[in-house]
Amino acid sequence: MRFKTFNMLVMLALFLFSVVNFYIMQQYIRSEIDKVLIDSLRQYVYNLSLHVNEHLNDPTEENLHILLDRFNAGTKEIADLYVTDEEGRLQLTTDYSHDKQFTLPKQTLSIDRLSIDNIEKTTWVMLPVYKLDGLRKVPYHIYLKLDQEYISRIMRYLNWMQLLFPLSCLLLFAGAYYLFYRLVIRPLLGMYAYVSGETSTLPRSGIAEIETLSENVERYLKALKEMAYIDPLTQVKNRRSIDNALDIAIAAAQRDGESFGIAIIDLDRFKEVNDTHGHDIGDKLLRGIMDRIKTHLRQVDQIGRLGGDEFLIIFHHDKAPQNIYDALERIRKLCEAPFHFGSVTLTCTISAGVAIYPEDAKEKVALLKYADQAMYRSKNAGGNQVH
């Protein structure tokens, strides 16, 4: 699985978790509202009906007006209470603005059917009570007028609470995911882009382990690049790298209408060194030659190993061929100085061949061939020369 795909799956899982969490909390809060608001109101009305029943059957009990006022003061959900006889005549009320001609509400709801779904749409709730008249039960009714302003305020508050907890969880997880993304996922994606060559900048992280991983990746990639483009023995460009550099130099010269020069250098009688002193001394000699040549090249010039003891130098932006010949003469004389490798002292000379673009050739293969032929003319003339 790609890391980007994993990242998307994590984000999707976070979103689904938030949705499920919101739904669960909504159902939980609704059940709690039903318990706290509806059940308490229903219990309150049942208790009231018991007291009203007792009063209707025993008028010596507590004054019914006082009873209703006390019950009405005990809850904020009910605005007023009304008790009517079986013919709908008002017997008692806490709403003293009404007279005895109480008009029965057209739409009432039994207290048993009251729920969280309809409480905001319900104004009147009714509960029957009975007075014993001999063997006959005389029905009375208690009508409760709900305080919709208070209930709406409570419901708005509870609805906000339904949103607040899931939203808090979402923000908490989003913040945690942001930190995780910033400190872990983004650096890892950046490392992937860096390794893939999509970016040249290696990202950093505040986590020590990620930082160590980034440094190791950078170090390993640098080593891989050196293995791909640098000759491990002489620490100059390898054949592929110097070949690419020559392609770039030709393209730039064609674009800008400029000239430049190349030189192929070959060590004289290097095979004799290997045969006489061994390949270890031969390798040291190659490194020593390269160290001397590199110190006498400009920063814009490039040198690479073509193979064995043969090297290619690209002299950039040199319009005067004589400057190239002069530089190679200095390098030739520099290489004549003895090399000391422990008890072994060696004197080595070089043969060089020069080709100028575009005077000598305009194509890479032809340019290299021209320089190679010039180098062999130097060797055939006895070596230690520049042609």
Image (spheres, rainbow, N blue to C red):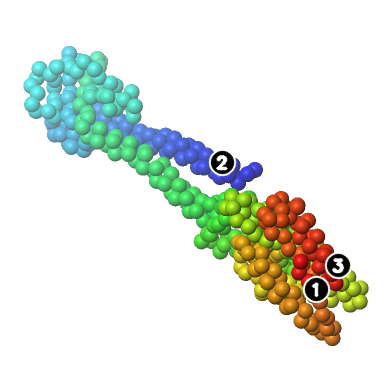
Location of residue 150 in the rendering, given as x and y in whole percent from the top left corner: 22, 34
Q: Where on the picture, by quarter, is residue 7?
A: top right
Left or right of residue 305, residue 2 in this image: left
Q: Are marks 1 and 3 in contact (CB under 8 Å)?
A: no
Q: Is residue 193 above or below residue 128?
A: below
Q: Which residue is mark 2?
A: 9
Which residue lies under the disc numbered 3? 380
Q: Position of residue 52 (x, y in %)?
A: 21, 28
Front position among marks 2 and 3: 3
Secondary structure at numbered mark 2? helix
Give the left or right position of residue 381, taking residue 295 as reference: right
Classify 10 Å Cα crowding around label 3: few (below 14), some (14-19), many (20 and above): few
Give the Cα separation between the discs numbered 1 and 3. Answer: 10 Å
Residue toward you, 159 or 310: 310
Residue at the right extreme of this rendering: 275
Residue drawn where x is 9% and y is 28% of the image: 96
